[in-house]
Image: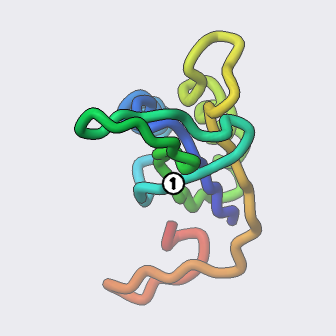
Amino acid sequence: MKLIIAVIQPTKLEAVQEALASIGVTRLTVADAMGFARQRGHIETYRGHEYESHLLRKVELQIAVNDDFVEQTIRCLEEHARTSKEGHIGDGKLLVLPMDAAYQISDGLAGPGAI
């Protein structure tokens, strides 16, 4: 079992969610996130005043998958989270972490079946 954490552009959330559902990955957690990396922020205007924002809005997806779904989930995320065919700085990151256990609260099911 693996936990895939994907940090993507908010505008790509719907496309990624639909693509994941099409390959059978229907359970995920979505959270708003703020990030800062090579993009270095941007200048915004609020009520006529310009200010520099170093943190940019992102969306974080947490997806727990069984081992046989890891590679196709990663390929799906890479393909549908890109903002263009060749990709751009700021399109996001994918992190894959080992997961020791999973438990379903409603009925106590444990292991790969709980995912």
Residue positioned 41% across, 36% down in the render = 50
Identify whether 83 is placed above or below 37: above
Residue positioned 38% across, 85% down in the render = 105
Q: Nearer the viewer, residue 69 or 13?
A: 13
Q: Nearer the viewer, residue 39 or 16?
A: 39
User: For residue 13, which quarter of the picture?
Assistant: top left
Residue positioned 70% across, 73% down in the render = 99
Q: Position of residue 4 (x, y in %)?
A: 64, 55
* For residue 81, side relative to residue 98 (left or right): left
Please give the count of numbered marks on the rendered protein. Answer: 1
Q: Position of residue 86 (x, y in %)?
A: 71, 12
Q: Nearer the viewer, residue 43 or 105?
A: 43
Identify whether 103 is placed above or below 68: below
Identify whether 38 is placed above or below 85: below
Other residues around mark 1 within 10 Å, as few (<14) / some (14–19) / many (≥20):
few
Residue identifier under label 1: 34
Quarter of the N terminus within the rendering:
bottom right
Residue positioned 23% across, 38% down in the render = 47
Q: Amino acid at mark 1?
A: Met
Q: Position of residue 89 (x, y in %)?
A: 69, 28
> Coloring scheme of the render?
rainbow
User: For residue 2, which quarter of the picture?
Assistant: bottom right
* For residue 43, side relative to residue 2 (left or right): left
Q: Position of residue 90 (x, y in %)?
A: 63, 33
* For residue 6, side relative to residue 70 (left or right): left
Q: Tag 1, which secondary structure?
A: strand
